[in-house]
């Protein structure tokens, strides 16, 4: 598939005491939604912090939008929307204050769009005139909510409203789905879809998740991360061609053992992932072969990586 | 204009409303002092010493408490809530401007309070009871103590610790007064003590630069991924 890069990285290294993020090459395709999948502590948040310009203490080169911009001037941040799982705003900021703050922090922020999104996402606040109309000037129940009075889910929705109220070309979202209920996850997926559609191929999304099942229907490209490095990446259809889900009975286990990329057994049989290139090796064994889900591929790749270490 | 816009975004409406109450408090407090002073203490020009001491206590307490409500623990170890600033191209500039403007606002509040005290005294006694050098001496010293306390208090989130700092500050001022003025523990309120003016000025400058530098540095390194 032909594509250009929304983000290109070279030799990105960030060292901690007991952990090193080391990514020799990074290509995030433009015009697609990329999911960064990995277990806790794999380095996803660190990588996203680096890519969003939040963290600047790393080694390596990163360019954005086909190499046209870098983080050196920080102006590229105007084109990037970033959401983080927690601690994004001062906890005593009110929602109205956040709206004012976004307005001074970014040139491309639209106050009215933000208010519309707040209403659409059902975040429990009211703004200025709405307050006076409904319950008088000081509607403590709705109007003066602070961040620390909101649930985790509403905090994420607030960030989502903030980034979507701006004209950006790239969204970087760290664990956006985790605190959301199933209904809101669906809304999040819808919002990502419409963001991409409105961008007409010029916009990109990079999000991280522990649980790819939630975001599978919006994901075009996947990067699987383990121990500070991306160990597998590709477009979803390509990965689904590369890996095959294989199922069989318990008595077939000795025949396939060692040939599968990853396998889980129980007393009745087994289920495993096979590399498509090796499918001939198990041909004729009467195994059931299916297309794996993205989640199954991710789990198999991570488990295989662990085993091989 | 841009700086004012940044400051308005940086501070909440409640915080700004709270600041408007302070001058009112100063007027009421000093009217009460003048009335009670004449009635119970028999008058005398040393009412100004009492007024300055009271201003120091109330101003320090007010600024520490309001600052705690606005940005408590900003220079502390656990600062994390900074991503909104870090992900913006001008986040650090807005943050720094907010801090500097608030320090300026604190200075204006103090100057205004001194002016109001002079006005109240003029109404009661026909003159302000303080000349410009005396007002400057008190301004510099009170502002110096406040900024030093502010710099320290921003390392802690807890209101209780900030209160403790306030008590320590009061003890510190008395100890310093005794040390500089012999047995006069409140020597800083006496007229013509230029040592307090110089001391206050030096401490103010160091504390203001210090608190802004520390908070900005802490903010820049406030990553949530560690």
Image (cartoon, coloured by chain):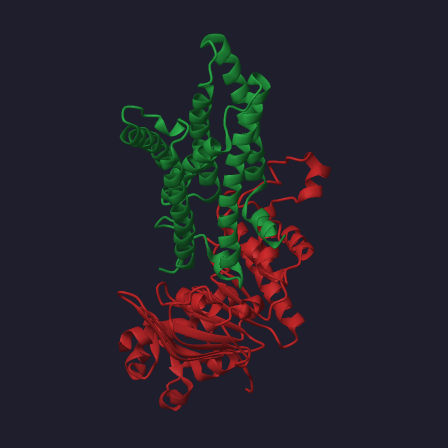
Chain colours: A red, B green
Please, is residue A87 above or below residue A302 in the view? above
Q: Position of residue A308 (x, y in %)?
A: 27, 78
Residue occupying the point 54% across, 24% down: B128
In the displayed structure, A254 sits above or below B213; it is: below
Against B169, residue B83 (above or below) is below
Task: Using residue A40 as the reference point, say whether residue B37 is left or right of it.
Answer: right
Q: Is residue B197 left or right of residue B128?
A: left
Residue B169 is drawn in which quadrant? top left
Q: Position of residue B182 (x, y in %)?
A: 27, 26
Residue B89 vertical placement versus A1 (above, below): above
Closer to us: A141 or B168: B168
Q: Nearer the viewer, residue A48 or A194?
A: A48
Looking at the picture, tell me which residue is in the foreground, A61 or B139.
Answer: B139
Between B90 and B185, the one nearer to me in the picture: B185
Q: Is residue A270 visible?
A: no
Q: Quadrant of the C terminus of chain B?
A: bottom left
Is residue A222 among the parts visible in the rendering?
Answer: yes
Residue at point 63%, 63% (across, down): A108
Q: Residue at x 38, y 60 (%)?
A: B225
- Residue lying farthest to the bottom in this orientation: A280
- The spot of residue B142 in percent (x, y) is 42, 35
In the rendering, at what x and y percent does residue A147 appear? 52, 46
């Amino acid at each position: 598939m032909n594509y250009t890069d929304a983000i290109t990285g070279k030799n990105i290294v960030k060292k901690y005491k007991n952990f090193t993020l080391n990514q020799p090459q990074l290509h995030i395709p433009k015009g697609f939604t990329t999911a960064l999948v990995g277990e806790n502590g794999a380095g996803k948040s660190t990588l996203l912090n680096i890519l969003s310009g939040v963290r600047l203490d790393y080694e390596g080169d990163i360019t954005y939008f086909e190499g046209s911009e870098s983080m050196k001037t920080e102006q590229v941040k105007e084109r990037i929307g970033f959401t983080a799982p927690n601690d994004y705003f001062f906890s005593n900021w009110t929602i109205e204050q956040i709206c004012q703050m976004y307005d001074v922090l970014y040139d491309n922020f639209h106050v009215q769009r933000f208010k519309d999104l707040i209403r659409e996402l059902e975040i429990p606040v009211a703004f200025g005139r709405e307050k006076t109309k409904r319950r008088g000037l000081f509607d403590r129940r709705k109007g003066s909510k602070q961040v620390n009075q909101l649930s985790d889910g509403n905090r994420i929705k607030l960030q989502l409203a903030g980034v979507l109220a701006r004209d950006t070309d790239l969204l970087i979202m760290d664990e956006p789905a985790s605190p959301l209920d199933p209904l809101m996850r669906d809304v999040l997926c819808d919002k990502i879809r419409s963001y991409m559609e409105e961008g007409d191929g010029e916009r990109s999304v990079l999000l991280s998740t522990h649980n790819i099942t939630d975001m599978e229907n919006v994901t075009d490209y996947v990067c699987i991360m383990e121990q500070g490095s991306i160990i597998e990446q590709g477009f979803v259809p390509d990965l689904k061609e590369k890996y095959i889900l294989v199922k069989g009975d318990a008595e077939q286990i000795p025949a396939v053992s060692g040939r599968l990329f990853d396998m889980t057994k129980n007393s009745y049989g087994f289920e495993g992932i096979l590399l498509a290139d090796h499918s001939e090796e198990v041909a004729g064994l009467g195994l059931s072969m299916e297309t794996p889900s993205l989640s199954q591929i991710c789990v198999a790749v991570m488990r295989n990586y662990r085993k091989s270490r | 204009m841009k700086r004012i816009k940044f400051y308005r975004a940086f501070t909440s409406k409640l915080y700004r409303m709270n600041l408007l109450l302070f001058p009112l408090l100063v007027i009421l407090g000093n009217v009460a002092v003048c009335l009670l002073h004449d009635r119970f203490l028999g008058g005398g020009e040393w009412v100004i010493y009492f007024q300055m001491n009271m201003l120091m206590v109330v101003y320090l307490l007010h600024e520490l408490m309001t600052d705690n409500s606005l940005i408590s623990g900003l220079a502390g170890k656990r600062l994390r809530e900074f991503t909104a600033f870090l992900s913006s191209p001008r986040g650090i500039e807005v943050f720094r401007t907010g801090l500097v403007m608030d320090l300026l606002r604190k200075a204006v509040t103090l100057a205004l309070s001194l002016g109001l005290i002079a006005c109240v005294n003029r109404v009661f006694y026909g003159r302000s009871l303080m000349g410009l050098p005396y007002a400057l001496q008190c301004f510099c010293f009170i502002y110096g103590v406040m900024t030093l306390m502010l710099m320290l208090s921003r390392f802690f989130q807890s209101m209780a610790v900030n209160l403790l700092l306030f008590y320590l500050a009061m003890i510190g001022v008395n100890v310093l007064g005794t040390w500089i003025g012999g047995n006069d523990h409140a020597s800083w309120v006496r007229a013509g003590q230029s040592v307090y003016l110089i001391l206050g000025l030096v401490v103010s400058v160091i504390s203001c630069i210090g608190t802004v530098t520390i908070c900005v540095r802490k903010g820049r390194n406030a990553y949530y991924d560690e």
